Structures are given as structure tokens and as C-alpha cells.
Amino acid sequence: MIEYLLTAFFVAQPVAPAAASGAAAQAPVPRLRDPVAISSRRLSGSRERAVFSGDVVVTQKALELRCDEMAASYTGPREVTRVECSGQVRMVEGSRTARGERAVFDVPAGVLSLSGSPEASDPTTRLRGAEMRLKTGVPGFEYEVDEAVVTLEAAPLSLPRKSPGKDAPAARLPAEVSARKVVGSRSQSVFTGDVVVKHRTLELRCDKMVAYYTASQQVTRAECVGHVRATDADRSVKGERAEFRVPTGVLVVTGNPEARDATTRLRGSEVRMTVGNANFEVKDAVVTVESATPLPGREAGKGPPASTPSNPPSGGTRSP
């Protein structure tokens, strides 16, 4: 049996009926609105459904969708409404790419749903999850992902000057966020359910987080609510709300915040922790410092005094 390449064209709205045969030569060719072109090695079909197999390629405007086998559902006038793909699904639209093992393309809505270890990316964002829905035909990267792991390009860090008149080079370190679900648009992404953020040495957890982007799709700020927990090296802080300022690495925690390091517990109305910095900054602070344990054999009352709240150890924890 000889394989052949077959291309079928469908339209997104019914084509106007042809003119009478006597005037057909003079009748203008009807314009196709957003035509869908499908090519494959083999085709079998009926009035409402066609099955394409072997090197299937679907194109609509800037969208190109490839897979091993595809079923297209359409109305009587050949208006494609739904495309189902399976096997090595690959999508390209401008600078956006996606892949998975299965896909459903809702043509009127312009939504591509991917499953089977799906991944998607653009120049600043990488998505992974159990299932994802991507909006096509829009200028920004709009998505919805279940059981999501999202890698975002963070805004450059604001590093101190190395010497007068010279700025330290801008460091660009991505942030990785996992959550039960994420919904993203051009200006922000909303993460819900078991949110975990990893950026530099910081690990931040909460119930819900909103990440805000610049015009170039870099994350500059994130707001967390619900059971906020953060760790950085041997320090930790918890509260009900937090704001993470990415360029400066400053995490501001409110809502009965409490911070700890190896020897100190701090409470107050607001706690600030800077990534990579050993100090805390606390408003309305109440500080508890762990007392030193006497050495074995040392008699009571002899030797240097133990650390107390009024005699804190030298080190990095401070409260204004």
C-alpha cells in the first residue's frame, strides 16, 4: 500500500454558497476566516469526524500542532470545532512551545489542553504539571496548570556596589514555584494549594501566592497568604501574610509573625528577613535568647555569665 500526503482545509465559519453555474467563473472566491489546515499520511472520515494518522500537522494562523494521530470533529459545513491528538504531541506558536502525549484543541475558544507529562515554555517561563490548558492566539502567555511546577525568570538582584562608581553585575536567578494549581496571564500568576517557592537559598511555603511580572515578564514581587513558612539556612520565620521583594531578596512577614535562628526567638508586628543575610529586623519586638548550658565540672557562679535577654550573644540577630 502506497502512503500519500493528504492536506484538508476546514474553515472556522461556513463558506457562502457558490453562485449559479453560469456565473461561477465571475463569482468572487469566498474568504476563509482562520482556516485550519491538516496534513497527514492517511485519512479516514465521515460527515462529522475525520481521523488523520502518520506525521499529522495542524496549522491555524501562527499555531502549528504536530502528533502521530488526530481526530477532527466538525459541523456540516466543515467548521472544525474540536481536534484530539495523541502520540508525541508538539505545539509551536511564535516563541511559545508545548509538548505532551495527548492534546485537545478547542478551536472556537482557542484553548489547547495537554496531558501525559505535559511541558510548555516561552522565553521567561517553563511549565510542568499533570494537565495544562494554554490560550492560543493571544500576545501573552496565558495558562492554567494542575499539579504545577513553574520556573520563572526573576528580576535582576539589586546587589551592592563593589567599589565607588561601579555596579556589581546583575544576577539573574530563576524562581521555581510548585502548587496544586496555577493560573497565569501577562501581568501575574496566581498559585493555590501547597505553594512552595524556591529562590536562591530561600524556601517559602503558603496556601496562596500571587506573583507579579514586569513588562518583560520577569517576577519582581510575590504576595503570600495563609500559613506562611520560610527558611533560609538556619533561620526560619512564620506568619499569616508575606511579601517577597525579589530584586532585594527581602521577605516581609506579618500576621503574628515569629522568627527563629539557632539561639534566638523573635516575635513582633512585622519581621523582615533578607535572603543570605544573617540578621532579622523586627517591629515591636519581643526577643527570647537561649541561655548557654554550663560546661561539665564548672561550679555555679564561676566563669563568664550565660547569655540572657538582657545580655544577648554577639551575632547577627537584631531588632530595631
Image (cartoon, helix red, strand yellow):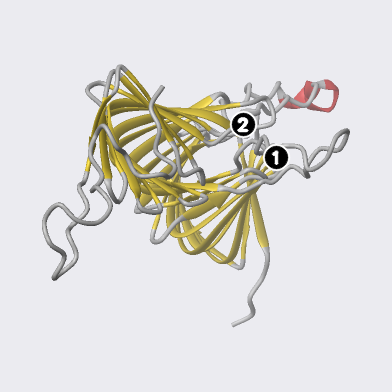
Residue at position x 70%, y 44% from top? 95
Residue 176 shown left or right of residue 194 in the figure:
right
Residue 68 percent across, percent down from the top left: 52, 66
Image: 296 above or below 125 = below
Residue at position x 38%, y 37% from top? 182
Which amino acid type corresponds to the residue marked 1 in the rendered image? Answer: Ala
Image: 129 above or below 251 = below
Q: Which residue is mark 2?
A: 137
Q: Which residue is mark 1?
A: 62
Residue placed furthest toward the right: 165
Residue 160 percent across, percent down from the top left: 70, 37
Residue 21 shown left or right of residue 173 in the figure:
right
Residue at position x 29%, y 18% from top? 269
Asked if residue 52 shows in the view, the reply is yes
Give the quarter of the figure containing the N terminus.
Answer: bottom right
Which amino acid type corresponds to the residue marked 2 in the rendered image? Answer: Gly
Label 1 close to label 2 by CB (< 8 Å): yes
